[in-house]
Amino acid sequence: MSPPCTLTVVEPGEDDADVVEMWRVTHAKTGDALTVRLYEVIHDSSHELGIDPGLIKDGVEADLQRLLAEQVGVIGENLTLVRREFPTAIGPVDLLLRNPEGGTIAVEVKRRGDIDGVEQLTRYLELLGRDPHLAPVTGVFAAQEIKPQAKVLAADRGIRCVTLDYDEMKGIESGAPRLF
């Protein structure tokens, strides 16, 4: 039975004379119920595991953006960070960088890079390119995985793609054999 379900321990009825314990699992949305009858308990133990920390998703887009801001060398050599979440009229650019020649680089960071991300970066580049303090502006589309269609569209629009290795950026060795 799929979640969400509730488990309740119920008293066995008169028809369940040999039943030691009875559980009823009920689906919260549909009301479907599953009854489990235990006729013998050989061993029953309980272990306190402490406070449930909950699930924490590692490697979300914000984590990638933070790590990339700290390691702009992944994008290219001698780049400096201007600002994270650079504000524009149509939304913030994830990272704004400068190269030694004074050119501006707008970086869009995604976990999974697809055509929508390239379109988003294209709009930012068009808007930022009109600002005389920032022009010329080039674009970098950075993601852990970039779909082939997104790579083709990015190349067509003069946007460079960079595939990010989250574990490497965190300083964790993947354990997979590497040639170099």
Image (cartoon, rainbow, N blue to C red):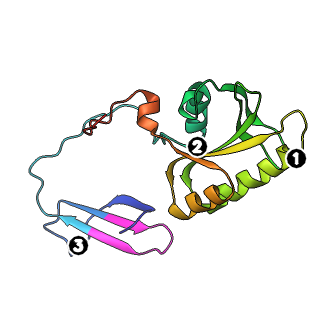
Q: Where does label 1 land, which residue?
A: 89
Quote the CA–CA distance across marks 2 and 1.
21 Å
Q: Position of residue 85 (x, y in %)?
A: 74, 36
Q: Residues within 10 Å of mark 1 (few under 14, many from 20)?
A: few
Amino acid on which the number 1 mark rests in the picture = Ala
Give x and y (percent) for residue 122. 74, 54
Q: Residues within 10 Å of mark 3 (few under 14, many from 20)?
A: few
Q: Residue at x 32, y 71 (%)?
A: 34
Question: Viewer-proximal residue, 125 or 111?
Answer: 125
Residue span colored magenta: 24-35
Is 105 or 65 nearer to us in this picture?
105
Q: Residues within 10 Å of mark 2 (few under 14, many from 20)?
A: some
Dot 3 or dot 2, earlier in sequence? 3
Q: Which residue is mark 3?
A: 14
Q: Which residue is mark 2?
A: 61
Real-space CA distance between mark 1 and mark 3, rounded to the nearest whole angstrom? 72 Å
- Image quarter of the N terminus: bottom left
